[in-house]
Image (spheres, grey):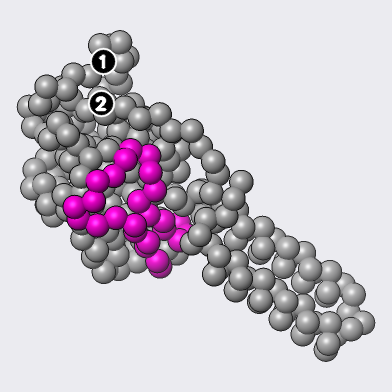
Amino acid sequence: MTIHKEGYTSLALCILFIFIVNAVIQFYFPQAFALKWVVYILSFLLFVIILQFFRSPSISISTDETQVLCPADGKVVVIEEAEETEFLKDKRIQVSVFMSPVNVHINRNPISGVVTYFKYNPGKYLVAWHPKSSTENERTTIVIENHAGVSVLFRQIAGALARRIVWYVKEGDTVQQGEQFGFIKFGSRVDVFLPLGSAIKVAIGETVKGGRTILAELPAVAGVKVKEADTEKSIPVKTEKAVKKPASNKA
C-alpha cells in the first residue's frame, strides 16, 4: 500500500503536531508518566487514522464500454429516478455513494470517453446524506461522453467534514475508465446520473469499491449492445421511490 499524493502535506503536518505535543509534555511534565503514555497512544492513533485515510491501494481494473464502474469506495445510499437540472436537463437514474472517513477517498472515472462538461460550484457543507447536498453543497460536476455518444454525469460533493475537493480533469480531456479523476478529503459523497434504461447492478446499503464494483450496464444505444449473458442477470432498479416508465431510448 502506498500513500496518495494528496496526503503528503497532511501527514507532514500531523507528524509536526505530534512532535510538538510530545515535546511540550516531556518538557513541562517530565515525571507525569501516565500522562505521557496517554499522549503517546493518542498520537499513534492520530497518525494511523491520517495514514489510512490517505492510503492508495493498488487495484486491478477491468474496462468495459458497456459497463459503468463505481467512482468511489463507500456505501450506496440512493438509487432513484431524478431530474438532472444542471447540464443534461432530463430524467436520469441517480446512484449515490456515501464515503465515510474510513474509506479510500480516491475518485475514479466511471466510463471512458471525452469530458464534455466540467464545473466547480462553491456551496454549503450539509451532511453528505442530506437530500439537498447534491445541489447546495460545494461540488464539482463532470460529464463524460463515450464513443457511442452516451453521457454519464457524476459529482464530487463535499460533506460536513470534507472541506476540500480535488480534481485532475478539465473539459476536453480524453479519459480512461477506472483512472483517477480526483480526491475528496474526509467524509463525502459521489452522485452518478445514468441514462434511463441502464441495468443497475447494486442495491441500497451495499458496500462498493471504486474502480472495481460495477454500478450498472448502459442501455443498448447508438449501436452498442449490452452483452446478452449479463443482461439476463440484470437487477431491476429498486428504490424507495420506484422508477416509473423508464424511457430506454434516451441517452
Q: Which residue is mark 1?
A: 227
What span is in magenta? 163-187
Residue 2: x and y in percent read: 59, 50
Residue 223 on the magenta segment: no
Mark 1 touches mark 2? (CB < 8 Å):
yes
Q: Quadrant of residue 39?
A: bottom right
Q: Is residue 1 above or below residue 240?
A: below
In x, y percent, where is residue 19?
A: 73, 76
Q: Quadrant of the C terminus?
A: top left
Q: Tag 1's secondary structure?
A: loop
Residue 94 appears in view: no
Crowdedness near tag 2: few (<14), some (14–19) or many (≥20) residues, C-alpha within 10 Å: many
Q: CA distance from mark 1 to mark 2?
A: 8 Å
Could you tell me the amino acid type at mark 1? Lys
Element class at badge 2: loop
Q: Which residue is mark 2?
A: 66
- Horizontal arrangement in the rendering, residue 183 relative to residue 194 (left or right): right
Query: Residue at coordinates 31% horizontally, 27% vertically from top-left?
Result: 64
The answer to which of 65 and 158 lies nearer the viewer is 65
Quarter of the view holding residue 202 = top left
Specify whether residue 125 is in view. yes
The answer to whether residue 186 is magenta is yes
Of all residues shown, which one is farthest toward the bottom? 28
At 28% from the left edge and 52% from the top edge, which residue is drawn? 155
Residue displayed at 72% across by 68% down: 43
Side of 36 where 219 appears, left or right: left
- Whether residue 69 sits left or right of residue 49 in the image: it is left
The residue shown at (62%, 57%) is 51
Q: Nearer the viewer, residue 24 or 112?
A: 112
